[in-house]
């Protein structure tokens, strides 16, 4: 049985730019970087070295050639934080496109865009009483 999400594949046009965005702006770390014999390069990033889930950054054009039927659209990712206001301010100061903070029943949420206009969401979950 499946018991957790291990990795999320993110297909981008420019891997180096994407890695730079996630590490320099969002604070993720590079966990590993690999190349296979067929020229496929992938970079694993995560919020912390011991995170249970990581993001694998793949070259969209290369993957499209290898797997023509694969959906290469951006997955809808929801990140969690305990410091929403601090993160919102930090991303805004770095001139990252951020949406308004919205109050939802499950917590406060905002979205942000990477350099390729892919949007991601961040939630500060409400305290359960």
Image (cartoon, rainbow, N blue to C red):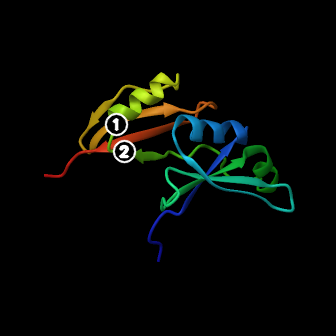
Residue shown at 50%/50% (left/top)?
47
Bin the neighbour count of mark 1 within 10 Å (Cα to Cα): few under 14, some 14-19, many 20 and up. some
In percent of width and height, residue 92 lies at 46, 24
Mark 2 Cα shell of 10 Å, populated few (<14), some (14-19), many (≥20): few
**Relative to 129, 85 lies left or right:** right
Q: Taking 60 as reference, is 86 left or right?
A: left
Residue highlighted by disc 1: 84
Total marks shown come to 2
Relative placement, left or right, of 86 versus 54 is left
Q: Residue furthest bottom?
A: 1
Q: Are marks 2 and 1 in contact (CB under 8 Å)?
A: yes
Q: Nearer the viewer, residue 21 or 78?
A: 21
Q: Measured from the top left, where is residue 127 in percent x and y?
A: 20, 48
Residue 114 sits in quarter: top right
Q: Return the residue at label 2.
A: 81
Residue drawn where x is 34% and y is 29% of the image: 101
C-alpha span from label 2 to label 1: 6 Å
Is 121 displayed left or right of 119 in the figure? Answer: left
Dot 2 falls on a residue whose secondary structure is loop
Horizontal and vertical percent position of residue 93: 47, 22
Residue at (31, 31) in percent of width and height = 102
Q: Is residue 9 above or below residue 89?
A: below
């Amino acid at each position: 049985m499946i018991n957790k999400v291990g990795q999320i594949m993110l297909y981008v046009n420019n891997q180096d730019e994407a890695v730079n965005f996630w590490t320099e702006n969002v604070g993720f770390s590079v966990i590993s970087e690999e190349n296979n014999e067929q020229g496929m390069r992938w970079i694993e990033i995560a919020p912390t070295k011991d995170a249970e889930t990581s993001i694998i950054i793949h070259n969209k054009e290369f993957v499209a050639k290898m797997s023509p039927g694969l959906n290469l659209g951006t997955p809808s990712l929801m990140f969690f934080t305990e410091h929403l206001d601090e993160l919102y301010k930090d991303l805004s100061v770095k001139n990252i496109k951020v949406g308004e903070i919205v109050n939802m029943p499950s917590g406060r949420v905002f979205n942000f865009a990477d350099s390729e206009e892919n949007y991601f969401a961040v939630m500060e979950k409400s305290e359960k009483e």
